[in-house]
Image: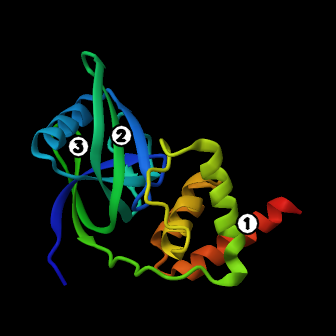
Amino acid sequence: MAKPVALPLFPLNTVVFPGGRLPLRIFEQRYLDLIKRAIADNSPFGICAIREGQEVGTPAVPCTVGTRVRIVEWDMPQPGIFHIDTEGLDRFVIRSTRTEASGLLIGQVEAVSVEAPTAVPEEYELATEVLQHIIGEYGEARFPKPHLFDDAVWVGYRLSEVLPLKLSMQQDLLEMNDSVARLRILVEILRQHMN
């Protein structure tokens, strides 16, 4: 097992899944500094759902599993505000945290094993059909290619992002290490909404 590495953390009221995109508007000084460093060094940072607290002000308590992200696009429309587009890389688990003087949270994190690509079982093809429809509606700006409709991991992650799920449910889906079980839950949710 690799030993934990330091990763700046950005607790938010959202969950990012590996391969997913998340646009952010950055204005708090501690995060402006983090983003400037990430752009300059092409370094990743971690996004975690908030377990306790708020996005702004005193550092929030993050959930223990989050996603390492990288900045794929950025813009500074006015001084003191960054618009960035992030892409989820892989999941991590937080072993410990410390808070810098600026209020930035630094986690000692370990990578969570990457789920191997798995075929979508026939009984869960509804998940693929719904996702294809959603991507057809929203376009590739929101869902950049490649589209891996035959991979249960990719389909499960994308559906977990776009369905109107509670934050706690999204977090549970992120923490799962079984792509078929994740799809089964999502298909059950879809069927409930269709009835």
**Mark 3 and 1 residues: CB-CB less than 8 Å, in contact?**
no
Mark 1 burial class by Cα count in 10 Å: few <14, some 14-19, many 20+ = few
**Quarter of image, res 100:** top left
Q: Secondary structure at mark 2?
A: strand
Residue 6: give x, y in percent of width and height: 15, 60
Which mark is on residue 104?
3
Q: Which residue is mark 1?
A: 189
Q: Distance of mark 3 from mark 1, alpha carbons?
A: 36 Å
Residue 159: give x, y in percent of width and height: 59, 60
Q: Nearer the viewer, mark 3 or mark 1?
A: 1
Residue that sits furthest to the right in the current view: 195
Q: In front here: 101 or 142?
A: 142
Residue type at mark 1 is Ile
Mark 2 burial class by Cα count in 10 Å: few <14, some 14-19, many 20+ = some
- Tell me the residue at 41%/60% (across/down): 63
The disc, 3 or 1, on the residue closer to the chain's N-terminal end is 3
- Tell me the residue at 89%/63% (across/down): 195
Mark 3 burial class by Cα count in 10 Å: few <14, some 14-19, many 20+ = many
- Tell me the residue at 11%/39% (across/down): 40
**Mark 3 and 2 residues: CB-CB less than 8 Å, in contact?**
no
Q: In front here: 79 or 51?
A: 79
Residue type at mark 3 is Leu
**Quarter of image, res 68:** bottom left
Q: Distance of mark 3 from mark 2, alpha carbons?
A: 20 Å
Colour scheme in use: rainbow
Residue type at mark 2 is Asp
Q: Which residue is mark 2?
A: 85
**Quarter of image, res 115:** bottom left
Residue 37: give x, y in percent of width and height: 14, 40
